[in-house]
């Protein structure tokens, strides 16, 4: 389906675009600078086979490479623009061939550092086109075909047309990327790399993508991963590399110079505003697993920004603490019976609380043991590699559809008389589609009071954030 999109109709931009005013303003600037561009609505097919009607514009950009050339291009504007970069293609005629190079693949897809480092508000479509022209002047992306090659080129153009007109095309006889167990780790800090190593060691995923969202060249652990080339691990700065992921793990944390705790969290929120829309666009059926701090708040932020159902947005929560707690009960305090149904719930950190699922008896006799175990647990820190192992445990349950119960951050509204939209760690059954159901806790007034108090504090904090 094609629909003409004239300049004077910019204000009729479809409502699916989340940031319409910003997008309209940018399109006006594009039209003013490049009046030869034509705008239209078309159906775009993503790598995972999903389709969406998107605004796109086509035209030529002037390139000097000895002589002067007009290079035809097509840019697709995502509905999360300007927080996600456009998708860019060459648009050759039947008499033009594609010169595969550093910035262009065999299908005409354009890859540029500007796209990889896209960050609103400093990144703009005008800036992108300027870099495109500069790179094309270093390496011309198209060449003139002889008549004998024109027929072969028409086949390639047919493929490109199918992408842009909504036909789900598969190339080659390889395994469909949407059917493999693929995990993306967003963030290449210590925690992100720890998650990559743990998930790779677990062996559940067929492919692991590490999204390095930092600016500049690869550093530290990312560089080492690149040097030693782990099998089935890909490092990328392009959000499109996450397409088809069944789980996306968010490990990014802002390293700004914020002065207050609220400022620190707001910096993380601002960071997520540029990440979540792009992730949710390329991975529309994924499960978001949040490991960024504070995990309860950032899981809430991810849920709000993604528009995903609550079942597909969870945080790592108290999974690590619960497993440690059970280990202490079983191996140190020799209380195997108590360990089986023991959980750490609530908020990650000092306000966590120990509890049991329904059906346990002899409450007084177990409280002393549980308190001793909690004292031991408080002395355990949460290193990056420890959290990475916990992430690998959770992704294993999701990808294998184990229906195993974990204490993870989930929407707690309706539980324990909590009426606000907050995420707390609670025992949940996990499967392919994320959180399948919540396991009911025992009716302990002290635990419920603690959870309600924690929920109130988190909700007060969330009300001060600017989403």
Image: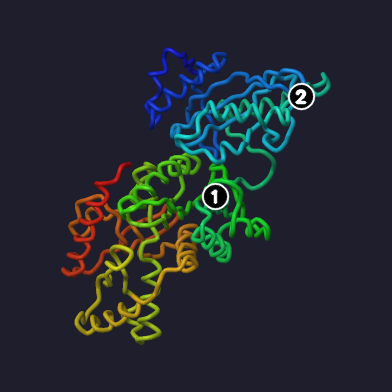
The quadrant in which residue 207 appears is: bottom right
Q: Residue at x 54, y 49 (%)?
A: 211
- Mark 1 and mark 2 in contact (Cβ < 8 Å)? no
Query: How far across and how far down the image is residue 454, in percent?
Result: 23, 60
129 left or right of 297 in image: right
Q: Is residue 422 shown left or right of residue 27?
A: left
Given residues 71 and 302, the one toward you in this image is 71
Tell me where residue 450 appears, x and y as whole percent: 20, 65
Q: Residue at x 53, y 32 (%)?
A: 86
Q: Residue at x 42, y 46 (%)?
A: 271
Dot 1: element: strand
**Picture mark count:** 2
Q: Which residue is mark 1?
A: 211
- Within 10 Å of disc 1 (Cα), the crowding (few <14, some 14-19, many 20+) is many
Direction from residue 403 to residue 161 in the image, left or right: right
* 199 vs 307: above or below: below
Residue nearest the observer in this picture, 97 or 273: 273
Q: Position of residue 270 (x, y in %)?
A: 39, 44
| The C terminus, quarter of image | top left
Residue 372 placement (x, y as % from top left): 29, 82
Which residue is depicted at the point 72% across and 17% down?
68
Q: Secondary structure at mark 2?
A: strand
């Amino acid at each position: 389906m094609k629909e003409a999109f004239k300049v004077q109709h910019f204000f009729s931009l479809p409502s699916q675009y989340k940031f319409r005013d910003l997008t309209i303003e940018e399109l006006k600037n594009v039209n003013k600078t490049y009046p030869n561009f034509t705008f239209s609505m078309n159906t775009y097919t993503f790598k995972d086979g999903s389709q969406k009607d998107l605004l796109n514009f086509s035209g030529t950009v002037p390139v000097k490479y000895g002589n002067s050339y007009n290079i035809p291009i097509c840019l697709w504007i995502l509905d999360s623009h300007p927080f996600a970069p456009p998708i860019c293609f060459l648009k050759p005629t039947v008499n033009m061939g594609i010169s595969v190079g550093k910035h262009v693949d065999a299908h005409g897809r354009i890859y540029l550092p500007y796209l990889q480092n896209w960050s609103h508000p400093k990144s703009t479509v005008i800036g992108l086109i300027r870099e495109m022209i500069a790179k094309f002047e270093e390496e011309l992306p198209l060449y003139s075909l002889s008549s004998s090659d024109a027929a072969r080129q028409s086949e390639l153009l047919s493929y490109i047309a199918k992408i842009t007109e909504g036909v789900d095309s598969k190339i080659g006889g390889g395994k469909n990327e949407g059917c493999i167990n693929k995990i993306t780790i967003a963030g290449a800090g210590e925690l992100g790399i720890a998650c990559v190593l743990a998930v790779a060691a677990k062996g559940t995923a067929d492919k692991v993508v590490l999204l390095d969202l930092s600016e500049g060249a690869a550093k530290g652990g990312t560089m080492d991963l690149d040097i030693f080339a782990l099998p089935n691990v890909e490092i990328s700065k392009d959000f499109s590399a996450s397409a088809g992921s069944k789980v996306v793990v968010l490990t990014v944390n802002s390293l700004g110079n914020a002065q207050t705790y609220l400022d620190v969290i707001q910096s993380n929120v601002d960071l997520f505003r540029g990440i979540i829309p792009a992730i949710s666009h390329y991975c529309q059926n994924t499960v978001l697993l949040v490991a960024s701090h504070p995990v309860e708040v950032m899981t809430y932020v991810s849920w709000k920004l993604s528009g995903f159902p609550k079942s597909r947005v969870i945080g790592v929560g108290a999974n690590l603490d619960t497993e440690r707690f059970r280990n202490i009960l079983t191996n140190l305090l020799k209380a195997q019976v108590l360990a089986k149904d023991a959980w750490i719930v609530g908020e990650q950190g000092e306000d966590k609380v120990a509890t049991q699922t329904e059906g346990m008896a002899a409450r007084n006799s177990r409280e002393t043991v549980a308190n001793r175990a909690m004292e031991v647990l408080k002395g355990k820190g949460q290193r990056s590699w420890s959290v990475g192992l916990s992430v690998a445990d959770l992704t294993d349950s999701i990808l294998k559809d184990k229906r195993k119960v974990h204490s993870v951050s989930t929407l707690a509204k309706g539980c324990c008389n909590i009426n606000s939209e907050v995420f707390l760690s609670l025992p949940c059954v996990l499967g392919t589609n994320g959180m399948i159901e919540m396991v009911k806790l025992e009716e302990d007034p002290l635990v419920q009071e603690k959870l309600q108090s924690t929920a109130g504090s988190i909700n007060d904090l969330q009300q001060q954030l600017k989403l």
